Image (spheres, grey):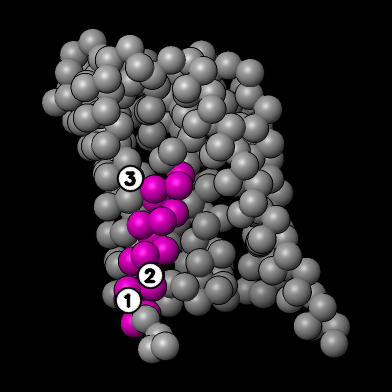
Amino acid sequence: MPELPPILIAGLTGFISGLLLSIPVGPINLTIINEGARRGFKWAALIGLGASVMEVIYCSIAFTGFSSFFGNPYIKAAMEVFSFVFMLFLGIRFLMAKTVSSPMHISRTADRLEGRIEKKLQPHSAFFTGLVRVMGNPGVLLFWIFLAVNFMSREWVSPTWESKLACVGGVALGTGLWFFGLSWAVSRGHGKFSEKTLLRIEHLSGLGLIGLALLHGAHIAWQLARTKG
């Protein structure tokens, strides 16, 4: 079977990761669900567009602003371990969630930062609401940094501008597709998105993150075994 071109691999990596990262129920999805049912598809889709733009900005920062650290083997190894712990932590939190009435938070400091950003910028338009909600969540940037380390260490994304742009473009397509589809479904379904349905989605995303974390942990163990051998 012929191998896929590196640019296509980078684009698919960005698309899949962007899609998976958008699925867990959080501030943006809850806002789209509430506003879509109340104000219609266009308003919800613009919220999703603003969120997608900020996701792409954070992803670009992760690949460009921190790429100089990836060459250090000690930093890369530490980041891989941290990413394993972080994904496992998020997966367990999503899987054990009892309600979706309040978004999962990383720390009280992060919650205060998010509140200050929203209070200072005071978004009024749909697009700006989505943009600011993602901007005020430092966990999004942190997660993209971890993912960027993993993607580049596995050579799914090459340290070239073309490959990084392909991955970022895939992220834009993946996040945009999810938020657009969710906006359309909510505007058509209205009351069908009960808390039980949202909680089931969150539990499934938690299982997915735990599975990814275990695969990542197995990869780390394999690398250690190969190094010792």
Q: Which residue corresponds to mark 3?
A: 175
- Alpha carbons under labels 1 and 2: distance apart: 5 Å
Horizontal and vertical percent for residue 113? 49, 25
Magenta residues: mostly which secondary structure?
A: helix
Q: Residue at x 37, y 65 (%)?
A: 12
Q: Which residues are magenta?
A: 5-21
Which is nearer the eye, 188 or 219?
188
Q: Is residue 197 above or below residue 211?
A: above
Tell me if residue 115 can be seen.
yes
Residue at the far right in the pictured view: 228
- What kind of residue is marked 2? Ala
> Residue at 78% across / 83% down in the picture?
226
Q: Is residue 134 left or right of residue 216?
A: left
How many residues crowd mark 1 within 10 Å: few (<14), some (14–19), many (20+)?
some
**Cα distance, mark 3 to mark 2?**
16 Å
Q: Position of residue 20 (x, y in %)?
A: 45, 47
Specify the amino acid type for callout 3. Thr
Q: Position of residue 159 (x, y in %)?
A: 43, 76
- 19 in the magenta segment: yes
Q: Which residue, given by chain and number where applicable, does mark 2 sit on?
A: 10
Q: Relative to 115, is 224 above or below?
A: below
In the rendered image, residue 129, in percent from the top left (x then y), is placed at 28, 24
The residue that mark 1 highlights is 7
Q: Are marks 1 and 2 in contact (CB under 8 Å)?
A: yes
Answer with left or right where residue 8 lies relative to residue 212.
Answer: left
Q: Is residue 34 left or right of residue 75?
A: left
